[in-house]
Amino acid sequence: MKELLHDVILFIQYDGTNFAGFELQPGQRTIRGELEKTLAKVYQQKISIISAARTDAGAHALENVVSFKAKNSIPLDKIPTVLNTVLPRTIRIIKAEKNNGHVRHDAKTKIYEYLIFNGENLPPQLNHLVWQVGLPLNLTAMKRAARYLVGKHDFSSFCAAHSDDKDFVKKIHSFDICSALGGSFVIWGGVKYRLIRIRVTGDGFLYKMVRNIVGTLVCVGLGKLTVADVKGILEAKDRQKAGRTAPAQGLCLVKIRY
């Protein structure tokens, strides 16, 4: 009699600061590596996972989704507790559910956020969560430039070199650029800080696409590029035309919608 496989999806969060990204890397500590090592220990068998998204080295996630199959069962409501007792504290299982599809192919949209600390004297507690840009950013110009990127386009200009992506056409549903928490400044410890949040929702993203877009929009905010330049960069389909790649630590995968 064939042994029954239990098909499970996990909703996970992680701080990617000390990891070489999500995907397996030879000789490197990765999110997937820690998950598979923990699953193998708990289930006493080799387990490979499938992920909905693969984040960069140093990037974070409030919600990524993975699936796995195991030959023996742990009650779904017990899985998070069991796995979290073994996983490093920088990776947390939020919930587990029965898998009824494919976590990657069935994903409809992904939401990413990028945080920018706009000013001097960055609080040390934020060092691994934001990109510090010291000079004032023109948010109005950045918002106007981002409008060119909404919709279905060839995003070759924003795809990292040496990517294994084959289809460069993606659809961005929305861009939201604002000061975090809805105000011009965040008050922390009696001091005013300007924290800028860039939230982008799309059906999929190329390798380092969000970080390359953020870097380009920051160039607009600093006056190094014009709003109209962004339209030309998109149409050029040339990575060398776009701005720098924003650092990974400001990027967070917020949610995957099915």
Image: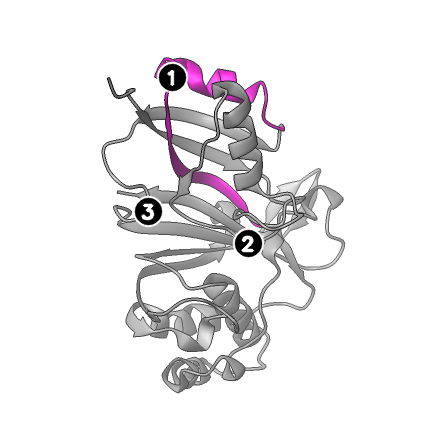
Q: Secondary structure at mark 1?
A: loop
The front one of 47 and 225 is: 47
Q: Type of residue at label 1?
A: Asn
| 255 left or right of 29 in image | left
Q: In 3D space, how far apart are the residues under numbered discs 1 and 3 (Cα atoms)?
A: 24 Å
Give percent across and percent down for residue 230: 43, 80
Name the quarter where the N terminus is drawn: top left
Tell me the mark number nearer the camera, choosing from 1 and 3: 1
Q: Type of residue at label 2?
A: Asp
Q: In 3D space, how far apart are the residues under numbered discs 2 and 1 (Cα atoms)?
A: 32 Å
Residue 140 is inside the magenta segment: no
Residue under label 2, please give it. Answer: 56
Residue under label 3, please give it. Answer: 104
Q: Type of residue at label 3?
A: Arg
Q: Residues within 10 Å of mark 3 (few under 14, many from 20)?
A: some
Residue under label 1, please give it. Answer: 72
Q: Measured along the vertical axis of the image, is residue 99 above or below residue 205?
A: above
